[in-house]
Image: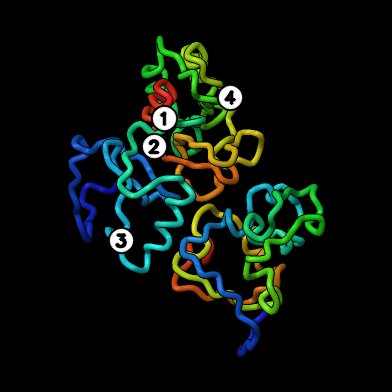
Amino acid sequence: MSDDDAHFNRVKHFAVDELVPQVTWGTSPEMVTGIDGRVPELSNFATGSKDSIQRALNYMGLKPGQPLKGLSIDKVFVGSCTNARIEDLRMVASVVKGSKVHRSVKQALIVPGSGQLRLQAEREGLDSTIRDAGFEWQSAGCSMCLGMNDDRLSEGERCPCTSNRNFEGRQGKGGRTHLMSPVMAAAAALTGE
Amino acid sequence: MEAFKEHTRVVVPFDRSNVDTGAILPKQYLKMLEKTGFGGFLFDDERHLDPGDVEIPVDERRKNPDFIPNLSPYNCATILLGRASFGRGSSREHAVWALKDFGIRVAVASSFGDIFLQ
C-alpha cells in the first residue's frame, strides 16, 4: 500500500462494479473481453497486429464476432499462484455447493496455491464441498498452469483456467486456455460452457 | 558472456511477435539439471513434427521441413531477428541457454520480454 502522502504521476478511476467478468479469447492475457462479449473483428486491430490476431484465433478455434458465452469446454482448472488463495477457494466452494460438475466436463481440477492453504481449506471443510460437487481436490503444485506433469490439456481441448498465462501450448500442446476468475471457472464447470 | 566488437554472420529470421519463453524452450525440458544441452530443444514444438521429452533422443524425431531455423544456412545462424515482445512470459533462464546452445550470440528484436531481457 502506498503512503498516504504518496504522489502519483497519473490517477485513473475504474468503475469496477460495472465491469462484466472478463474472459480471454486469445493466446495472450490482453486478448480479453467481457463474458457477454464477442471475439473482436480483425478490422479492430492495426495492420501490423492482424497476423498475430489471426494466428491466435486459428489456434483457439474461434472466429471474429463469435460470442464467448456458450462455448463448450473440456476441462476446468482452478489453481496457480495467481488465483488459488483461501479467499478464492471459499468463493468457489460457495458457488459449487449443492451442485455438480457438468457431465460433459472431462476433468475439473482444484489445486490450492500452497500446502498451507490446502490445510486451511481442509480445516474449513472446503475440500468436502468441492469434492461433493465432483471436482478433483489436489495437492498444491503447478499442475495445469504449467502442464508439465500429467495435469495437462490434449490437442484442441478448451479449458477455463485461473492462471495468468494463456500462451500457445501452455497447458499442453494444442490446448486452448481461457483465463478467468476462480468463480467464473467454477461456474463454467457446472454448466459445461 | 563473451564480448565482441563486430559480428558478421548468418541471421535467422523469426517472423512472429509475442514469442514466449515456453515456445523458445518448452516446459518438459525444465526437468534437465544441466545448464547445457538445450540447443536441440530450441523452439522444440515447432521445430519437430513428433512430440518430444527429455527421455526421447532428439535425433530420432522428425524435423519440421517448413521451419526456417531447420533449413540451411539458418541452422548455423548466430544472429536471431525477432519482432515485438520476443521472450515474453515466464521467467525461464533455460530459454536463454537453449538459444546460446543453438549458437545464437546476438538477438535483435523491436522489443523483448522484461524478464528475458535481464
Same chain for marks 3 and 1?
Answer: yes
Number of the label disc, if any, that sits on residue A138: 4
At x 59%, y 35%, the residue is A143
Number of the label disc, if any, that sits on residue A135: none
Residue A81 x/y as whole percent: 49, 38
Q: CA gap, disc 2 to disc 4?
A: 20 Å
Same chain for marks 3 and 2?
Answer: yes
Q: Tell me which chain the residue with mark 2 is part of.
A: A
Mark 3 or 4, closer to the camera: 3
At x 52%, y 50%, the residue is A168
Residue B1 x/y as whole percent: 66, 74
Can you identify the residue that label 1 sits on?
Answer: A185
* Above or below, comparing residue A19 to residue A86 in the picture: below
Number of the label disc, if any, that sits on residue A180: 2
* Colouring of the image: rainbow
Q: Of residues A193 and A64, which is closer to you in this image? A: A64
Residue A59 x/y as whole percent: 49, 50
Residue A28 x/y as whole percent: 43, 51
Q: Tell me which chain the residue with mark 1 is part of.
A: A
N-term-proximal mark, 1 vs 4 = 4
Residue type indicated by callout 2: Met
Q: CA gap, disc 3 to disc 4?
A: 41 Å
Marks 2 and 1: in contact by CB < 8 Å?
A: yes
Residue type indicated by callout 3: Phe
